[in-house]
Image (cartoon, coloured by chain):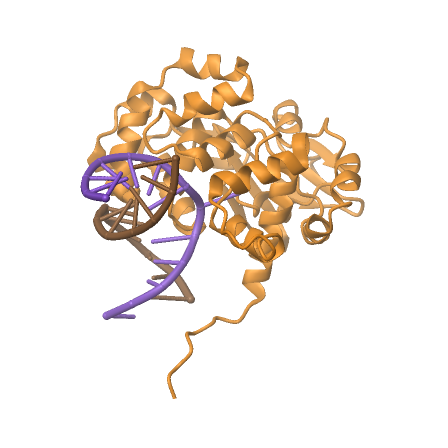
Chain colours: A orange, B purple, C brown
Amino acid sequence: MKKLQGFEIVEDFHPKHTLECGQIFRFSVFENEVYEVRTGKVRARIHKTPNGFFVETVNSEFFRKFFDLKTDYSFIKKELGKHKEIATGIAHGHGIRILKSPLFEMIVSFIISANNNIKKIQKTIEKLCELAGEKVQDEFGEFFAFPTLSQLKQLSEKEFYGVGAGYRSSLLVKAIAVISDAWLEQLETLPTEEARSELIKLAGVGGKVADCVLLFGLSRKNVFPVDVWVERVFQQHYGRRNQAILKREDIRKFFVEKFGDLSGFAQQFLFYSIREEKGKQKPYRRAEAN
DNA sequence: CTCCAGGTTGTGT
DNA sequence: ACACAACATGGA
């Protein structure tokens, strides 16, 4: 049989955990737990092997960077494992890697993510690709690329509504209108804090969305996105003693100070394990009067 | 029918 | 500065 193009990963990599921890929205699961991940205008499929996983792609060079293969995760696990609350996350989410996704795609994706659920975010982004993205022929067949900046600049607010972006549509139009290629390039070179304040200038981008873009689109590991889930787990693990309920900005500072340059990894382990727990829970109902 | 989702924005104190 | 309602939409 034909030899597949691609490469194998044998250490610290699990496609399910990496793709389902909310850092990317364009992926699918096929039979036998084969995963497909799409990013920009390329994609790869991931198969289980006796020793690890095989990444099937004609763009090996790109996907090695995408999966952050140069980073030594054993060191990170060792360091973060010292913190009990993260240790359980590492166990549940072993093989999580922080992806390096295209910057512009992350900005648009995480504006859509605000006050939204992951299923819906995925659907909206997929529809956006079908509406405005280039139809690509590759080794697996046909699919739609994520739209380029100039492609999205041509969309109206109405068209964003049409793909299910809801009230974020006007924000998307405003944000995309002011983004330029030069601005995106410059962002790559700026220090984390400066890049963050640049991002926050965009409509629809606040602290949390900016942190996600920094982490997943700019590979800045010294950020800690605080969302509703992290907020809850903070109150559970740390908030008991401090009677004051901390605001998100303070929770963020707390974690960044605690985990430093490993903040991004810690956050992903934490986020994945919270949502795993939630999935196991029975659907709850409110206490009934009796 | 009500509540929630990887929050941000605009308004009022 | 801080609090808080409003914002589309679909699933539970």
Report x, y in % for residue A184.
Answer: 44, 17
**Residue A100 position by quadrant:** top right
Q: Residue furthest bottom?
A: A290
Report x, y in % for residue A249.
Answer: 48, 38
Q: Which quadrant of the rendered structure holds the C terminus of chain A? A: bottom left
Does residue A125 appear in the picture of this structure? no
Tell me the residue at 73%/41% (across/down). A80
Q: Is residue A66 left or right of residue A127?
A: right
Does residue A247 appear in the picture of this structure? yes
Nearest the eye: A8 or B2: B2
Tell me the residue at 52%/22% (across/down). A193
Nearest the eye: A5 or A82: A82
**Residue A159 position by quadrant:** top left
Q: In the rendered picture of this protein, how many numbered marks are placed on residues?
A: 0
Tell me the residue at 50%/26% (across/down). A102
Report x, y in % for residue A198.
Answer: 42, 20
Tell me the residue at 67%/49% (across/down). A93
Q: Which quadrant of the rendered structure holds the N terminus of chain A? A: top right
Nearest the eye: B5 or A154: B5
Q: Is residue A249 left or right of residue A16?
A: left
Report x, y in % for residue A49.
Answer: 75, 46
Q: Is residue A178 above or below residue A39?
A: above
